[in-house]
Amino acid sequence: MTTTAALTDVAAEFPVIARGGGSFSYLDSAATSQTPQPVIDAMTRYYTETRASVHRGVYPLAVQATDLFEGARATIARWLHSSPEETIFTANATAAINLVAYSWGRSRIGPGDLVVLTEMEHHSNIVPWQMVCAERGAELAYVHVDGDGLLDLDELDALLARGPRLVGVVHVSNVLGTVNPVAEIVRRAHDAGAVALVDGSQAVPQIPVDLREIGADFYAWTGHKAYGPTGIGVLHGRRDLLEEMPPFIGGGHMIRTVGERESTWADLPWKFEAGTSQIAEAIGLGAAVDWIEAIGIDRIRAHEQALVADAMARLAEVPGLRMHGPADPAARGALVSFVLDGAHPHDVGEILGREGVCVRTGHHCTQPLMRRLGAISTTRASYAVHNTTADTDRLIEGLGTVIRVLQL
């Protein structure tokens, strides 16, 4: 195959990939993306030039650190068409969703109430709501996935007719690749009087996201899948809801006053950011957003969509291989999940790894979806801006080795 021409120069900006010198193909960005040098440089500059705590000092170094930290928040908010006050830094998307579950859920969900999720949710958008429902005596129901990897929106409407308190939906499935119509789902949820939460962890680094158009009450995502560092996530929330919600974690930084018996809280977004902030990580995530914007999210989407279309066409020719998710690449994010008849995905992944192909195998933190698919686990190849069709060449060649080794 001919290597994809667009964006091929980008790979040189990723130190891990450049160091590999073409010895491996990284196809696991849905789990954790590689980090480009400008992001690493931004974090290094903080540690070597402006290392200080934020918001707490008036000396120049602390002011510089605070400006960088809050500047990153402003960059991130502007990119997704949110506001800094509605942009809360968390440890990851899981922490962001737990913030909503603990702070909003435990004060708004009661006995007999209904919470609606989908079968394609990541565990991070299932387990917190299981805990809330069990504690509060509420009911949990799921919108099923059809044979094409799409949500049954008629079933959603039937559940909405019961007046749920919350609807939680993933923007892009980390297994099926399905790009869900979240703006439409949010609109229907609101018409039914429900609050809508969207898990955007896979969407933000792959497709254009405009929070104004989506209209979700809460939108969560994580930095380490968006070319940023680990240890930083983001929750975008509707300001009026955030102002009404109690703090999730108490301590320093999130207070206005502290008395012997009671305290008052800081303004948004700091009310939900207790303790010393993830300063370097936030600065790194802001740099990652700048880096993505310099390339253009539309270019990234077109590049990855072409790679997935090519990969799906070629994987369809592998004997005994079955792909999960929508057949139309345009309806997918940048990943392909599959099973190979007669082979355990862990064996597939181990042999591919020996051939220099980095893929993810397992249940991908989506065990309810695995049961729906009738699978214990799958093998997932996920693409990013640095990949080319040469990476798919290596994947297909590696699968040939898998078939020979396992005598399939």
Image (cartoon, rainbow, N blue to C red):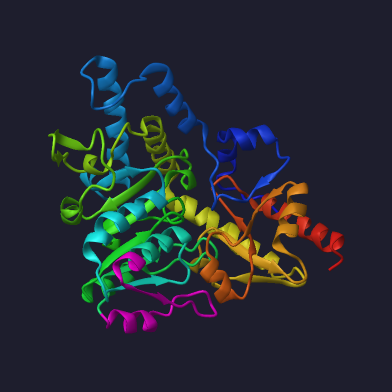
190 and 112: which one is in front?
Answer: 112
Residue 221 horizontal side relative to residue 86, left or right: right
285 and 56: which one is in front?
Answer: 56
Is residue 139 one of those drawn in magenta?
yes
Residue 57 horizontal side relative to residue 120, left or right: left
Residue 149 percent coordinates (x, y): 52, 74
Quarter of the C terminus within the rendering: bottom right
Q: Residue furthest top?
A: 59
Q: Residue furthest front?
A: 261
Residue 24's quadrant in the figure?
top right
Residue 112 percent coordinates (x, y): 27, 76
55 and 66: which one is in front?
Answer: 55
Residue drawn at the location 35% of the way across and 72% of the way down: 116
Residue drawn at the location 47% of the way across and 38% of the way down: 229
Residue 191's quadrant in the figure?
bottom left
Residue 84 horizontal side relative to residue 403, left or right: left
Residue 396: tell me if it is visible.
no
Residue 62: tell me if it is visible.
yes
Residue 181 percent coordinates (x, y): 38, 69
Quarter of the N terminus within the rendering: bottom right
Instruction: Tell me which segment is drawn in magenta.
Output: 133-162
Residue drawn at the location 56% of the way across and 48% of the way down: 6
Q: How many marks?
A: 0
Residue 255's quadrant in the figure?
top left
Question: Up-down: is 51 above or below 343?
Answer: above
Is residue 310 one of those drawn in magenta?
no
Residue 254 percent coordinates (x, y): 22, 38
